[in-house]
Image (cartoon, rainbow, N blue to C red):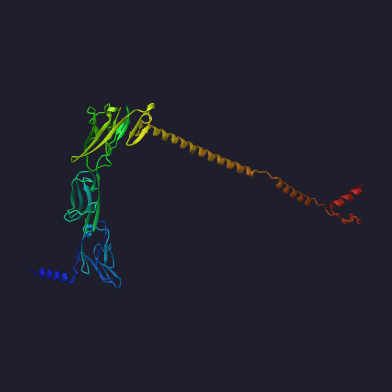
C-alpha cells in the first residue's frame, strides 16, 4: 500500500477518535449571507481558512486580529467563533476550516423557483414545479405542499397531475435546511356567471368570464342554448394575427364585440322574447384538451308601463332610456353630462371666490384711506383751541409801566386794573 494512503487513513482514524473532524455541507444563495460556527470556547484563539488560505486570525485574550491573504478577508466579520460571509459570490465557494477541526464545504448557488406552464392553472391540468440549482442539478431538495406535507420525490423538478383545490396555495422548496424558497399556485375551478333577467323586447348581456388570467393558452370556446337550435352563436378563435377573438356574424338575436378578448367572454342577446327563456352554456377550451363550462339562466318578464326599459344583470337592476345609456369613449352618455355639469359648477365657484377676494381687498384699501383723512373730533378741537389761547395770552402780556407813570395811590393789580385807570383819566 502506498505511503500516502497509509498516512491518509491514519489521519482519518485520528480525527474520528478525537471527535474533532466535523464535516458540514452548506448552501448559500448568491448575494445572500452565510454563517459558520467554529465551536471554540469563549476568549479562545480562532483561525479561519478558505481552501487552506488564511482569512482571519483572532487572539482570544488580547482581541487582536490578523487578516490573511484570502480574497474574502475584507468583507467577512468574525465575532467570537462565528464567521459571517455576506454578499456571497460564486467564487466564495470552497472549504472553510477552523482551528477547532470543523470544516464547512460551502456552495454559493443561484436558485430559480417557478411553475410550468405557470402559477395560475385551470383545474385538472398538469404542472411542473421547478427548484433549479445552477451548477448542481443532482442536489436533492425537499418539497412541502400547502398543507405542509412532504413530497417523497426529492428531485429539483416534480410533476403534479390533475391539480385541484387542495393544490392551491404556497409550495416550498428546502435545500439542505439552509435555503428556503416559496412558490404560490392558484387553481381556477370554473368560469364566473350568474342568472339574468330582461324585460320583453329588451336586450341583456349573458355573462361569462375567468376570475383572472391563467397560464394555459385559450384555444377555443362557444355559447350554446339547446332550446334555440336555429340561433347562431359566435365561437372563440385564437390566431397569431388577431389573438383571442369571437368568430362569426352578428344576428338579429345575438351580437358581440369584435375586439381582442382576455378573460371576458360575454355576448349580448337582443329583442328578448318569452321563447328565449332557458339555460345558456358558456364553454372555454384551453391547450392540453382542458375545458371549463358555466351555465346561466335567462328570465324574460313583462315590459314595465311607461315604456321604461328595466334590465337586471348579475343581481343588479338598472333603469333608463336608450339615448342616455349610449356609450361614448367607453362610458355612458349620462356620465359625461354629469362630469361636464360638475366641472361648470366648480369653475363658477372658483370665479365667485376670486371676485369676492378682490372685493374684500378693495374695501380694505378704502377703509385705510378714510382712516388717514379722518377730521378732528370735538374733544381734540377744544384741546387745540385751549392750547392756542394759552399761547396768545402769554404773547399779549403788556409791558411793565415805567415807575414815573405809576400812581402811588393806586396799587398795581394786573393788566385789567391798569386799563380801568386809563379810562378814568380819559374821562
Judge by depth and name the residue closer to the eye, 303 or 151: 303
Residue beneath the point at 56% across and 41% down: 360
Choose top left, top right, bottom left or bottom right for residue 30. bottom left
Residue closest to the far bottom: 61
Residue closest to the far left: 1
How far from the left and from the top, in percent, is residue 249? 25, 28
Left or right of 29 on screen, residue 304: right
Placement of the N terminus among the 4 image quadrants: bottom left
Judge by depth and name the residue closer to the eye, 49 or 246: 246
Is residue 239 visible to us here? no
Left or right of 357 on screen, residue 146: left
Judge by depth and name the residue closer to the eye, 274 or 217: 274
Residue beneath the point at 88% across and 50% down: 420
- Whether 133 is drawn above or below 297: the answer is below
Residue beneath the point at 35% across and 36% down: 316
Choose top left, top right, bottom left or bottom right for residue 20. bottom left
How far from the left and from the top, in percent, is residue 273? 29, 27
Residue beneath the point at 42% across and 34% down: 338
Is residue 5 visible to us here? yes
How far from the left and from the top, in percent, is residue 215? 23, 43
- Count of numbered badges drawn on the protein: 0
Judge by depth and name the residue closer to the eye, 252 or 31: 252
How far from the left and from the top, in percent, is residue 359? 55, 39
- Whether 259 is drawn above or below 215: the answer is above
Choose top left, top right, bottom left or bottom right for residue 8. bottom left
Amino acid at each position: 500500500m502506498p505511503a500516502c494512503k497509509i498516512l491518509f487513513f491514519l489521519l482519518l482514524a485520528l480525527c474520528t477518535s478525537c471527535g474533532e473532524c466535523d464535516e458540514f455541507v452548506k448552501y448559500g444563495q448568491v448575494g445572500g449571507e452565510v454563517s459558520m460556527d467554529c465551536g471554540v470556547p469563549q476568549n479562545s484563539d480562532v483561525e479561519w481558512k478558505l481552501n487552506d488560505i488564511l482569512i482571519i486570525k483572532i487572539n482570544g485574550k488580547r482581541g487582536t486580529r490578523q487578516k490573511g491573504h484570502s480574497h474574502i478577508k475584507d468583507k467577512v466579520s468574525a465575532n467570537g467563533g462565528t464567521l459571517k460571509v455576506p454578499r456571497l459570490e460564486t467564487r466564495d465557494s470552497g472549504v472553510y476550516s477552523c482551528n477547532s477541526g470543523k470544516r464547512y464545504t460551502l456552495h454559493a448557488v443561484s436558485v430559480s423557483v417557478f411553475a410550468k406552464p405557470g402559477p395560475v392553472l385551470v383545474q385538472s391540468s398538469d404542472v411542473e414545479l421547478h427548484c433549479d440549482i445552477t451548477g448542481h442539478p443532482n442536489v436533492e431538495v425537499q418539497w412541502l405542499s400547502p398543507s405542509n406535507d412532504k413530497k417523497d420525490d426529492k428531485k429539483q423538478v416534480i410533476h403534479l397531475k390533475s391539480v385541484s383545490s387542495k393544490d392551491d396555495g404556497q409550495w416550498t422548496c428546502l435545500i439542505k435546511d439552509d435555503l428556503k424558497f416559496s412558490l404560490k399556485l392558484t387553481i381556477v375551478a370554473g368560469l364566473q356567471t350568474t342568472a339574468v333577467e330582461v324585460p320583453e323586447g329588451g336586450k341583456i348581456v349573458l355573462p361569462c368570464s375567468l376570475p383572472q388570467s391563467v397560464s394555459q393558452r385559450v384555444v377555443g370556446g362557444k355559447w350554446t342554448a339547446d332550446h334555440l337550435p336555429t340561433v347562431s352563436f359566435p365561437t372563440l378563435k385564437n390566431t397569431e394575427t388577431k389573438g383571442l377573438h369571437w368568430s362569426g356574424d352578428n344576428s338579429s338575436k345575438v351580437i358581440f364585440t369584435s375586439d381582442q378578448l382576455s378573460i371576458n367572454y360575454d355576448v349580448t342577446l337582443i329583442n328578448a322574447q318569452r321563447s328565449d327563456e332557458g339555460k345558456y352554456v358558456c364553454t372555454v377550451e384551453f391547450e392540453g384538451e382542458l375545458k371549463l363550462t358555466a351555465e346561466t339562466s335567462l328570465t324574460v318578464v313583462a315590459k314595465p308601463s311607461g315604456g321604461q326599459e328595466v334590465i337586471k344583470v348579475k343581481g343588479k337592476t338598472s333603469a333608463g332610456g336608450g339615448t342616455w345609456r349610449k356609450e361614448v369613449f367607453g362610458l355612458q352618455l349620462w356620465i359625461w353630462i354629469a362630469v361636464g355639469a360638475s366641472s361648470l359648477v366648480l369653475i363658477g365657484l372658483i370665479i365667485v371666490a376670486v371676485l369676492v377676494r378682490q372685493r374684500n381687498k378693495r374695501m380694505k384699501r378704502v377703509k385705510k384711506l378714510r382712516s388717514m383723512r379722518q377730521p378732528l373730533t370735538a374733544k381734540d378741537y377744544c384741546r387745540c383751541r385751549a392750547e392756542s389761547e394759552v399761547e396768545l395770552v402769554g404773547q399779549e402780556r403788556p409791558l411793565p409801566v415805567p415807575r414815573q407813570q405809576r400812581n402811588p395811590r393806586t396799587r398795581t393789580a394786573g393788566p385789567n386794573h391798569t386799563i380801568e385807570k386809563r379810562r378814568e383819566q380819559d374821562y
